Amino acid sequence: MSTKKKSESGFLVQGSILAIASIISRIIGLLYRIPLTAIIGDIGNDYYGAAMEVYSILLLISSYSLPLAVSKLVSTRVAKSERKNAYRLFKGALIFALISGTIAALIVYFGAEFITVYLVKTPLSIFALKVLAPTLLIVAVLGVVRGFFQGMGTMMPSAVSQLIEQIINAVVSIWTAYMLFGYGSRIGAVLGNSEQYGAAYGAAGGTIGTGVGALAALLFVLFVFTVYRPVYKRQMLRDRRNGEESYRNIFFILFMTIVPVLLSTTIYNISSILDMGIFKHVAAAQGYEETTYSTMWGIFSGKYKTLINVPIAIASSMAASSVPSLATAFASRDIPQVRRKVASSIRFIMVIAFPCAVGMGVLASPILQLLFHDAREMPARMLQVGAVSIVFYSLSTLSNGILQGIDRMKAPVKNAVITLALHIGVLIALMYGLDLNIYAVVWANTFFSFFMCILNGRAIRKYLKYRQEIVKTFLIPGIASAIMGGAVYGVYQLLMKFVKINVIATVISIIAGIIVYGIFLLLMRGLNEEDLKAFPKGYLIIRIAKKLHLLKK
């Protein structure tokens, strides 16, 4: 295999490692939300979701852009054999994280009442939000260490720490939610509102797990870094360049790298908290009861978003792994290699996003019954309507990372601003004009992700002179997914007619769908042998496919 092929394969393998860890983390997150939802209910999910939305935005502003910026800047210095400067940059980023994380934590803790009452119109989410304040500092430092390892070209510490974080989070969240729900119910009984106070304290218990999980992940990556540091210091002795960057210059470079990433990611993700504020204020103005719109939002954030975020996590992982790899290739002015990496990552994402979207849409109600014991029409309709956004969000998330990796930081910012303005207009029009209530949020989110794909795609074409391959990337996965969708629907209906047990019918339908999709994807040459080698267990898949005559021997 040529050096270029190895480079591209290694890039996808590293992306796959982080993607697999993210999928497993999301699955754990999905699984623990089942007992958590059973404990705190849809209204508790509203309180939990409101606190997490605010936390996520402050996390974005304070530290989310740090791993991306650190990985990009470290990788470019390591590529030039400037490991001393890479290490100094890492230390500068740690100082930056401590300052920004502390400021964010103080804002959340002392501004919790104003935020929950006036901005998100969810007063009882104050307990959950205050609990999250220290986590902002922990995650800021954690992000820098993860970014350093990603910049060094290894995703393993990030991947393992993600799994540790989510496992600890799941266990602690369920236990503390259960304990605090009972405590809140007793307080509520005295105040004459046991249901809402139980849900509010239970939601706060759920957010305790977030902090404890992040702390466990931080301790793990610090341990790995301590073990690795002597090796790295020996590598620094072989630096080609003797001069050291000043910390003043490092802070300036960090700031200039972080700000565009910060703006694009914040604007790209702030739509969630704006959606919540607009939806609740408009719903209240339209005469909906507080418990009604609180329940609607609880279903949206606790069930709909939890489910669609599982496949979207793959795109986030690929975006994180693509930035240092693309930055290294771009810094060496190897534009053909950059184009190949872009093509590989987009095809990888689409091969996974299309079947996830179709499967989620076809099996919306069975999946909700299986996971949440919820057979209501509203959550199933949300999932059916919004399933297509999995494809758009996956592609727009990845394209954000691609643009950042090729030093076009302003493009995602500009695109996100334009799309956000249009998104808000669409949301308000759908709520006031068509009275679609929570479905307006689902439709507006789909529009947002679709338009981001269009604008980011235009920017990539412009800056890389890149022409997207259509047939293998979009058409074949789309056709294979449509065939899979028909097969999944048929198998489910047949099993429900004879077996009449939803768990069995849903699980067998999903397995049948995976097999059908894989067969038709290979038969239509959607993936070749070189593509499969970059997948986890790729060589095993190749051997099986050749035995079944799905690949040429």
Image: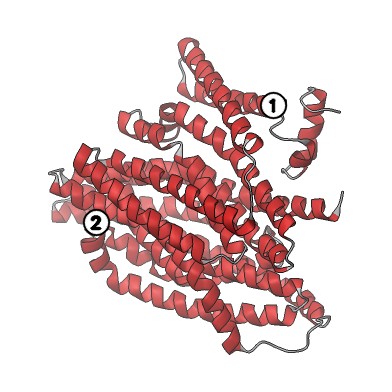
Residue 490: tell me if it is visible: yes
- Which residue appears farthest toward the top when viewing the image? 498
Q: Which mark is residue 19?
A: none
Residue 500 pos. (x, y %): 45, 15
Amino acid identity at mark 2: Thr
Residue 185 pos. (x, y %): 24, 51
Amino acid identity at mark 1: Met
Mark 2 residue element: loop
Viewer-nearest of labels 2 and 1? 1
Residue 139: tell me if it is visible: no
In percent of the image, x 79 and y 34: which residue is there? 542
In percent of the image, x 61 and y 66: which residue is there? 146
Q: Which one is nearer the viewer's eye here, 119 or 526?
A: 526
Q: Quadrant of residue 245?
A: bottom right
Label 2 to label 1: alpha-carbon separation? 51 Å
The first of marks 2 and 1 along the sequence is 2
Q: Is residue 368 left or right of residue 64?
A: left
In percent of the image, x 33 and y 60: which residue is there? 128
Q: Which one is nearer the viewer's eye here, 421 or 118?
A: 421
Q: Quadrant of residue 534?
A: top right
Residue 337 pos. (x, y %): 74, 56
Which residue is denoted by mark 1 in the rendering? Answer: 524
Which residue is denoted by mark 2 in the rendering? Answer: 122
Residue 183 pos. (x, y %): 28, 55
Mark 1 residue element: loop
Q: How is the image coloured?
A: secondary structure
Q: Which one is nearer the viewer's eye here, 476 or 56?
A: 476
> Is disc 1 surrounded by few (<14), some (14 to 19) or many (20+) residues within 10 Å?
some
